[in-house]
């Protein structure tokens, strides 16, 4: 639950900071890094001024960074694989398919195209498409988890109390 929420929150934050923001810049990028607890990691690793390509690399693709989407998707995939299944089947569950789709989308993203975020409208459009494509299977995963692992039965209620 929390892991999936964190991934979706980070995707929304990325969308706001890199896609919909009218004047993105160093102050906004610093807020993104601070909000995701990555400002210190960024400064230690890159030792330079903030650059959007490095931020995207650190927060999206770096599977060694526990706060990155790539790392969190790997953890999510491991946890989904350990969930109990109702039926014994060799096929992937809806949850496993959804998280596999998200991991695949991220791993198959054109990182080279995204590397020109500051200078290219095409890179920004590609990032927007990537974020949207990542969000779809994660929302499907949330729905599948709610459907298969939480009870939705209506609890009977007594409408009036009888006095004896």
Image (cartoon, helix red, strand yellow):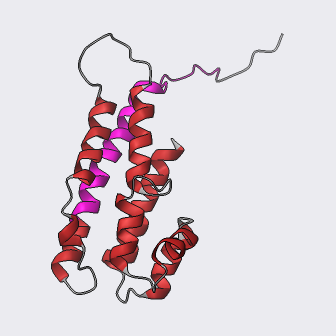
x and y percentages locating residue 98 in the rendered image: 29, 38
- Looking at the rendered structure, the number of numbered marks drawn on it comes to 0
Q: Nearer the viewer, residue 57 or 6?
A: 57
Q: Residue at x 23, y 71 (%)?
A: 114
Residue 141 belongs to the span the image colors magenta: yes
Which picture quadrant has residue 146? top left
x and y percentages locating residue 81 in the rendered image: 39, 27
Q: Nearer the viewer, residue 79 or 8?
A: 79
Q: Nearer the viewer, residue 159 or 54?
A: 54
Q: Residue at x 25, y 68 (%)?
A: 128
Which picture quadrant has residue 76? top left
Relative to 164, 48 lies left or right: left
Magenta-tinted stretch: 129-158
Relative to 86, 40 lies left or right: right
x and y percentages locating residue 112 in the rendered image: 19, 69
Q: Residue at x 19, y 83 (%)?
A: 120
Q: Nearer the viewer, residue 4 or 156?
A: 4
Relative to 110, 77 lies left or right: right
Relative to 56, 29 lies left or right: right
Whether 145 is drawn above or below 157: the answer is below
- Figure quadrant of the C terminus: top right
Residue 137 belongs to the span the image colors magenta: yes
Q: Residue at x 25, y 51 (%)?
A: 107
Name the chief secondary structure element in magenta.
helix
The residue sitting at the right extreme is 164
Whether 6 is drawn above or below 57: the answer is above
Whether 133 is drawn above or below 25: the answer is above
x and y percentages locating residue 125 in the rendered image: 20, 73
């Amino acid at each position: 639950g929390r892991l999936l929420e964190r991934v979706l929150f980070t995707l929304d934050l990325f969308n706001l900071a890199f896609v919909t923001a009218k004047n993105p810049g160093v102050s906004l990028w610093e807020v993104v890094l601070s909000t995701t607890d990555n400002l210190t990691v960024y400064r230690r690793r890159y030792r330079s001024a903030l650059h959007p390509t490095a931020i995207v690399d650190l927060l999206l693709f770096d599977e060694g960074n526990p706060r990155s989407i790539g790392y969190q998707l790997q953890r999510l995939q491991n946890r989904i694989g350990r969930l109990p299944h109702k039926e014994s089947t060799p096929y992937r569950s809806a949850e496993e398919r959804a998280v596999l789709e998200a991991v695949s989308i991220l791993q198959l993203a054109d990182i080279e195209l995204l590397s020109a975020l500051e200078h290219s409208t095409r890179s920004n459009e590609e990032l927007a498409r990537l974020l949207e494509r990542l969000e779809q299977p994660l929302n499907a995963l949330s729905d599948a988890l709610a459907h298969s692992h939480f009870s939705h039965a209506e609890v009977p209620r007594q409408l009036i109390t009888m006095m004896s």
